[in-house]
């Protein structure tokens, strides 16, 4: 034991003063009497003790004065050497961001406790902070004391807090401190120090959003998986906002812990942008997982050019205008050197390379066709069509009638429309190219069939 203020022991000089004050006063004038024997007999009969120089009351008073003097001298007992390294395991799962009313979130309270503790730590103590939950991060030294680059809570708590604390304690001269909200289904660590920062309440979450995009058409179909972690069943509101013709809102019934799938049919604008899907429930303490943002590409506004021979009907022009209105594009004149998004060809001879230009060709003779390669094919009878392609999905071509087609006008490609004759099935239409750039070729002109009516 050492004394931090040994000069305070000067108060011990009070002890002789207390001793002197406790002594009974002596008689100033002694008086002799002949009744001394009777006086002593009277004291014996009363069982009174004569005055003593040290009584119990005086002993207690002296002990109290001694204790006060020692306390004022600030005695310090030297302890055993403590830990020289502090490992902090910080729960950074999404639930740590929960905020119940005006109560600070568990993440905010954890950072406040760490800042206060790190400020009081001796400089020689090494600090390591392990972020558990979401992206795992490790900070050491000054960056750990400053709580640098820990981000925000998010994601699931995939780490075992108990295993981390036990492993860290195996290192010599190491102390472990775990800060968590006690949620996520993980067992609390039994080793080291533990701070549980609870903020409980109702929570709703958007788990997944699946989109079926009709691009380049404006239709957009969403399937949204939502769940509510509540004590009782309740109602929620699912909203879709962003580049839409009209914002969508749907009231749904939510059962505790059960995933519900909600379908939304939307019409989007041509601009594109961020489409936000949000779930709102009453008393939600964790709003960060109530929102999912999708990047919606802008609808194309293609320049559509038309090439048709002098004998063809205006079906190709009408088809191009209808397509342009559907996708927000416009029909332009064919000019040399002017790029277009789609070339619509009806009849004639087009010097285009199949699969290298986005084109829609009806009965157009390839530019590299040899003389005599193209032969008439009168009144082909429809045999079948591919129903699995996105191009023909949902179409019924059973009433297609063709007055005239041509052999030798189709380039190599993937057939999706066939006609039957004596030699078997023959392709009436093919797709040339790949997913990046493709052209569609038909063996007949628009005016030689009832396809425009279908």
Image (cartoon, helix red, strand yellow):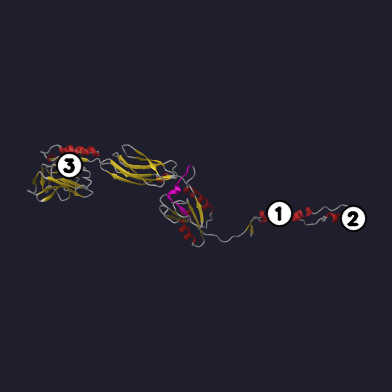
Q: What's the CA distance linking mark 1 and mark 3?
A: 109 Å
Q: Secondary structure at mark 3?
A: strand
Residue 381, horizontal then vertical, whole percent:
12, 45
Q: Report whether 142 appears left or right of 397.
A: right
Q: Secondary structure at mark 2?
A: helix
Instruction: Report the disc number at residue 64.
Output: 1
Residue 86, horizontal then vertical, whole percent:
50, 57
Q: Earlier in the sequence, mark 1 or mark 3?
A: 1
Residue 222, horizontal then vertical, whole percent:
32, 43
Q: Earlier in the sequence, mark 2 or mark 3?
A: 2
Q: What's the CA distance linking mark 2 and mark 3?
A: 147 Å
Q: Is residue 317 above or below residue 386?
A: above
Comparing labels 1 and 2, the label whose residue is closer to the camera: 2
Comparing labels 2 and 3, the label whose residue is closer to the camera: 2
Q: Crowding near pointer 1: few (<14 within 10 Å), some, many (20+)?
A: few
Residue located beneath label 2 in the image: 38
Q: Mark 2–mark 3 contact, CB under 8 Å?
A: no
Image quarter where the C terminus lies is top left
Q: Secondary structure at mark 1?
A: helix
Q: What's the CA distance linking mark 1 and mark 2?
A: 41 Å
Q: Mark 1–mark 2 contact, CB under 8 Å?
A: no
Residue 355 seen in the figure: no
Q: Is residue 438 above or below residue 324?
A: below
Image quarter where the N terminus lies is bottom right
For the magenta stretch, what is the residue range?
Answer: 88-101
The residue sitting at 91% across, 54% down in the picture is 35
Residue located beneath label 3 in the image: 344
Q: Report whether 175 appears left or right of 412.
A: right
């Amino acid at each position: 034991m050492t004394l931090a203020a040994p000069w305070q022991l000067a108060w011990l000089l009070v002890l002789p003063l207390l001793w002197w004050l406790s002594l009974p006063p002596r008689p100033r004038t002694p008086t002799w009497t002949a009744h001394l024997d009777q006086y002593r007999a009277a004291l014996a009969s009363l069982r009174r003790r004569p005055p003593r120089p040290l009584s119990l009351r005086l002993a207690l008073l002296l002990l109290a004065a001694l204790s006060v003097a020692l306390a004022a001298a600030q005695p310090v007992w030297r302890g055993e050497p403590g830990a020289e390294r502090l490992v902090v395991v910080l729960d950074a799962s999404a639930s740590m961001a929960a905020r119940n009313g005006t109560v600070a979130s568990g993440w905010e309270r954890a950072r406040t406790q760490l800042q206060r503790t790190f400020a009081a730590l001796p400089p020689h103590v090494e600090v390591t902070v392990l972020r558990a939950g979401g992206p795992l991060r490790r900070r050491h030294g000054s960056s750990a004391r400053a709580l640098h680059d820990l981000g925000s809570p998010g994601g699931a708590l995939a780490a075992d807090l108990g295993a981390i604390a036990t492993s860290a304690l195996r290192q010599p001269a190491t102390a472990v401190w775990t800060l968590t909200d006690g949620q996520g289904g993980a067992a609390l660590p039994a080793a080291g120090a533990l701070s549980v920062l609870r903020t409980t309440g109702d929570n709703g979450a958007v788990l997944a959003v699946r989109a079926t995009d009709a691009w380049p058409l404006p239709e957009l179909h969403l399937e949204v998986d939502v769940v509510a972690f509540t004590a009782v069943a309740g109602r929620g509101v699912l909203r879709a906002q962003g580049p839409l013709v009209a914002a969508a809102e749907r009231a749904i019934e939510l059962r505790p812990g059960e995933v519900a799938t909600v379908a939304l049919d939307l019409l989007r604008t041509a601009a594109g942008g961020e489409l936000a899907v949000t779930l709102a429930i009453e008393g939600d303490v964790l709003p960060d997982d109530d929102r999912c943002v999708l990047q919606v590409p802008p609808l194309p506004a293609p320049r559509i050019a038309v090439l048709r021979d002098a004998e063809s009907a205006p079906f190709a022009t009408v088809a191009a205008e209808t397509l342009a209105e559907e996708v927000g594009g416009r029909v332009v004149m064919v000019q040399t050197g002017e790029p277009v998004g789609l070339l619509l060809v009806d009849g004639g001879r087009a010097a285009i390379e199949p699969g290298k230009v986005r084109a829609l060709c009806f009965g157009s003779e390839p530019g590299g066709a040899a003389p005599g390669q193209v032969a008439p094919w009168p009144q082909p009878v429809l045999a079948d069509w591919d129903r699995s392609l996105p191009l023909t999905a949902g179409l019924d071509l059973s009433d297609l009638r063709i007055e005239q087609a041509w052999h030798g006008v189709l380039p190599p490609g993937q057939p999706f429309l066939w006609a039957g004759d004596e030699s078997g099935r023959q392709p009436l239409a093919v797709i040339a190219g790949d997913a990046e750039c493709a052209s569609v070729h038909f063996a007949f002109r628009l005016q030689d069939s009832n396809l425009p009516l279908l």
